[in-house]
Amino acid sequence: MSEIADNLPPEELAADEAHDDRPLKLAIVGRPNAGKSTLLNRLLGEERQITGPEPGLTRDAIAVILTDDQGREIEIVDTAGLRKRARIEAPLEKMSVSSAIEALKMAEVVVLCLDAAEGIHDQDLQIARLVEREGRACIVALNKWDAVPDRNATRKAIMERLEESLAQMKGIPVVTLSALTGAGIERLLPAVRAAHEVWNKRIPTGELNRWFEHALETHQAPLVSGRRLKLRYVTQAKARPPTFVVFGTRAEQTPEDYSRYLVNSLRDTFKLPGTPIRLQFRGTKNPFVEDD
């Protein structure tokens, strides 16, 4: 474990040692006018943020503390709407978008608020990819659900688009709600807590290697330059998000498609839906083992 820790940036190690009694850091992000501020007001039970039909009313990232029904604190940040870079012109809006991105980076869980009546846009997917790149847990909130005429078709279309476009966050939790009326809002914070637990999950090394052995038996390691890779064992380097390291002879040459197979198998076996999973490969050289 020390070998792995020595190779992790100090800020990742510090983040991994966070105390459970600290407030969960939650950011609400999305395109302009998706209902983020209305959602925050509904969660707080008061009109804390200015809302209205005009996009862009929120100009800065605003942090507030909410105590959930289990007495645990959540620090929620409502952010300015994230729009395409080409549409960002005013200096104030550029600052607002920068503030929103910084809030996302500081968060542990991110609620991506979508206007369900409009469906999912490419910009929504770009925001989700940014969440994945930053290694944050993510919940999709389908807001304005009360305004959707064909809910079954809409949900199916959105879920299919998410599965196709966000392979690195397979199984991302989706909550349907109306921030305006409060319908479905009671499901959001439990989903946030569940996503946070997955994001923090640690798997014992013994269980990991039993899974790893079975995964290699199911689909053996590939040939690279005519020689089969010898992947020997796996360990979890950190959580937040779950990060694993596979060791073996020439392990660093593992092809991307086999890495994806292992990530998907990890996600399915250990119930890690929606959270980013980091899988690293480290080559080993053992003088007592032939490299053939």
Image: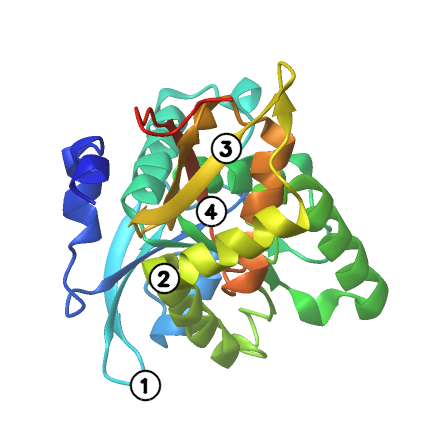
- 147 sits left or right of 135 in the view: right
Mark 4: amino acid = Pro
Q: Earlier in the sequence, mark 2 or mark 3?
A: 2
Q: Which residue is mark 2?
A: 206
Percent coordinates x, y for residue 96 in the rendering: 35, 34
The alpha-carbon separation of the residues under discs 2 and 1 comes to 36 Å
Describe the element under mark 1 as helix, strand or loop.
loop
Q: Earlier in the sequence, mark 2 or mark 1?
A: 1
Q: Which residue is mark 3?
A: 230
Q: Earlier in the sequence, mark 4 or mark 3?
A: 3
Residue visible at 59% across and 28% down? 256
Q: Which residue is mark 1?
A: 69
In the image, residue 160 sits, relative to residue 269, either above or below, namely above
Question: Looking at the image, do the residues carrying marks 4 and 2 touch, with CB atoms under 8 Å apart?
Answer: no
Mark 2: amino acid = Gly
Percent coordinates x, y for residue 20 in the rendering: 18, 68
Residue 265 visible at all:
yes
Residue 130 visible at all:
no
* Crowding near the residue tagged with mark 3, few <14, some 14–19, many ≥20 C-alpha atoms within 10 Å: many
